């Protein structure tokens, strides 16, 4: 297992790394990965853009669940994995981060140059006028509009979705945009059935094409939205390394795959390549045990 982290450190030490991260990087921050080993099957069918915009009842259900799930997302803090990625960036080895996560934790950990592919849950957009506001502000308004709304938080998914009874949903008061007065509000995240804005995708392809190495962290690469960057790198002959707990749909394209807990592997990787943290980052410096690597 020391050999596999050595192999990874050897590749990363050359610099020019672009990171593509997914839900597996945030599980240690208390945000469940519904596709990873720690997450059971997803409880709800994911909300699609078409249903959200076309069905006021479905929208009410979404916001009621999301309102309860938000407190979990809002209090989540970056973990050692996020901090190690930021350290690798400051050390000049990682040029940029593309994340599929909507929790904002890379930025919270101090990473510069993060492209949030699927948007951010802490921002809200009006579908009528395009006005953007903070989720914090909407959360205040929703709490005022729904006093005593204390439904049980049973389980939380990465998009802040929770279990909720029908009568609790029926009582939930949704809110419209305060700027235009009538517009429907939506978290500024990319829903299923919605496409990522083209300029954002182009920026990511540009980063990948300039990379010397694409490092996938905690993504099963199930959706094409992220997998396409692995396919592009492979096509261009840019090596791909995947660190994930469990197999991914990109393994066939990877020069190296590692199955390891990111909160332990990444600090060890940063220690080996850019040196011990200058303070604040509590990297263990210990090579993770139970690390299994599959070189290809
Ligand atoms: Zn509006």
Image (cartoon, grey):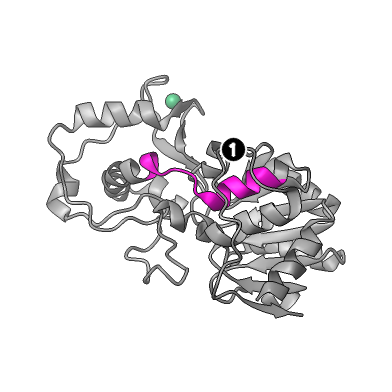
Q: Residue 99: where, in percent of width, then height?
A: 60, 50
For image coordinates 30% across by 51% down, the residue present is 58
Q: Quadrant of the N terminus?
A: bottom right
Of residue 182 and residue 211, the one placed in the foreground of this image is: 211
For image coordinates 82% across by 52% down, the residue present is 15
Q: Residues within 10 Å of mark 1 (few under 14, many from 20)?
A: few
Q: Is residue 241 left or right of residue 60?
A: right
For image coordinates 49% across by 54% down, the residue present is 26
Q: Is residue 97 magenta?
A: no
Q: Is residue 279 above or below residue 46?
A: above
The magenta span reads 73-88
Where in the image, quadrant-wise, is ligand 1 located?
top left
Q: Residue 214: where, in percent of width, then height?
A: 75, 59
Q: Is residue 212 above or below residue 200?
A: below
Q: Quadrant of residue 134?
A: top left
Q: Is residue 67 left or right of residue 120?
A: left
Looking at the magenta stretch, what is its main secondary structure?
helix
Question: Is residue 176 in sight in this rendering?
Answer: no
Q: Quadrant of the C terminus?
A: bottom right
Q: Quadrant of residue 119?
A: top right
Q: Is residue 126 above or below residue 293?
A: above
Q: Is residue 99 left or right of residue 76?
A: right
Q: Is residue 196 left or right of residue 189?
A: right
Q: Residue 276: where, in percent of width, then height?
A: 66, 47
Q: Residue 262: where, in percent of width, then height?
A: 56, 61
Q: Is residue 77 magenta?
A: yes
Question: Is residue 3 in sight in this rendering?
Answer: yes
| Circle 1 residue | 279
């Amino acid at each position: 297992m020391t050999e596999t982290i050595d192999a990874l450190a050897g590749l990363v030490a050359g610099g020019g790394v672009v990171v593509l991260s997914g839900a597996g990087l945030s599980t240690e921050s208390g945000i469940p990965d519904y596709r990873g080993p720690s997450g059971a099957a997803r409880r709800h069918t994911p909300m699609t853009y078409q249903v959200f915009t076309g069905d006021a009842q479905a929208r009410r259900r979404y916001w009621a669940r999301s309102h309860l799930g938000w407190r979990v997302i809002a209090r989540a803090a970056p973990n050692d994995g996020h901090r190690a990625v930021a350290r690798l960036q400051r050390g000049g080895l990682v040029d940029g981060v593309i994340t599929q996560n909507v929790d904002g934790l890379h930025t919270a950990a101090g990473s510069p140059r993060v492209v949030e592919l699927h948007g951010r849950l802490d921002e809200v957009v009006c579908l009528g006028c395009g006005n953007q506001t903070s989720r914090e502000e909407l959360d205040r308004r929703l709490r005022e509009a729904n006093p005593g709304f204390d439904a049980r938080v049973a389980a939380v998914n990465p998009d802040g979705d929770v279990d909720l009874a029908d009568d609790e949903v029926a009582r939930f008061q949704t809110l419209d945009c305060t700027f235009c007065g009538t517009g429907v509000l939506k978290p500024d995240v990319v829903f299923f059935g919605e496409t990522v804005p083209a300029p954002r995708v182009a920026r990511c392809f540009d980063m990948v094409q300039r990379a010397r190495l694409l490092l996938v962290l905690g993504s099963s690469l199930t959706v094409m939205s992220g997998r396409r960057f692995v396919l592009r790198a492979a096509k261009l002959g840019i090596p791909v390394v995947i660190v994930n707990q469990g197999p991914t749909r990109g393994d066939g394209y990877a020069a190296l795959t590692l199955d390891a807990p990111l909160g332990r592997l990444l600090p060890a990787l940063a220690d080996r390549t850019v040196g011990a943290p200058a303070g604040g980052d509590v990297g263990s410096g210990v090579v993770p045990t139970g690390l299994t690597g599959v070189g290809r």
